[in-house]
Image (cartoon, rainbow, N blue to C red):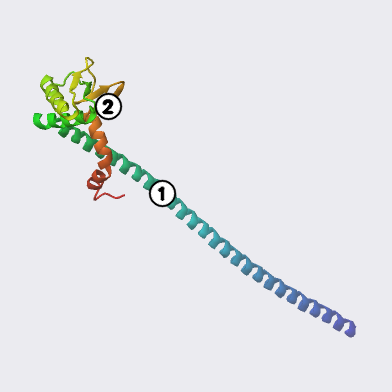
Amino acid sequence: MAGAEKLIEKIKSDAKNEAEKLWREAEEKKAAMYETLMRDIGKRKAEIDKMAHDAALEKKRRMTAVYDLEYRKQLLAAKQEMMQKAKARALEKLAALDDAQYLKLMKEKLIGCAVTGEGSIAVSKSETRLGDAFLADVNKALEKKVGKGRIAFSAEKIDIRGGFVYIFGGMEINLSLEAQLSEAWHEAETEVAAVLFENCDN
């Protein structure tokens, strides 16, 4: 029996040792799995944080782009409004020329148009400075320049602010103050803008 007991004890001891060995291996595997899991979680968290960071940066970039676009739109609208006001003030100054300056300007423009010395001009109902004396002076100058001075007033009254529309042979040339200013303004617009917005952000 002693031999059998020893065998049983050995079997039990071996089983215990094997169980402990298996337990240790299981614990080691569990620890390794936990470590791997924690590492994966840490890696995934870093990826998620990076994604969140990137998403936040992208959102910020988009918001900045939207705000920048809106700012530029408002700035452009403000600039356009300022340009319109500057143009309106320029027209006011042009309309406020004293009689001598106004008549001299209109005379030069009309002589420049009437290369044949003939034609007519249409003015507005409110025009008071371009009268018979003005046409007599122009016709006299045309007579000397081209040998003929036969400019007359058109019976038609038109809706313009100062100046006139020259009519000859089916052709019309708009020399109202608005038209003259628009032509000059187009040429000077860049320079005017540079002065107005010298200290503005582009």
Is 34 located above or below residue 193 in the figure?
Answer: below
Q: Nearer the viewer, residue 116 or 133?
A: 116
Task: From the viewer's perspective, tell me whether residue 137 is left or right of residue 176.
Answer: left
Q: Which mark is residue 41?
A: none
Q: Residue 109 lies in what quarter of the image?
A: top left
Q: Residue 184 lies in what quarter of the image?
A: top left
**Three-letter residue code for mark 2:** Ile
Query: Farthest front residue?
Result: 147
Is 163 located above or below residue 77 in the figure?
Answer: above
Q: Circle 2 is placed at which residue position?
A: 173
**Three-letter residue code for mark 1:** Ala
Q: Nearer the viewer, residue 100 or 198?
A: 100
Q: Which of 167 and 156 is in front in this view?
A: 167
Write the residue at 31% across / 39% down: 77
Q: Distance between the residues labelled 1 and 2?
A: 48 Å
Q: Circle 1 is placed at which residue position?
A: 65
Write the residue at 60% across / 64% down: 40
Task: Residue 120 in the image: state x and y as whole percent.
Answer: 22, 20
Is residue 143 in view? yes
Write the residue at 9% across / 30% down: 100
Task: Residue 59 in the image: state x and y as whole percent.
Answer: 45, 51
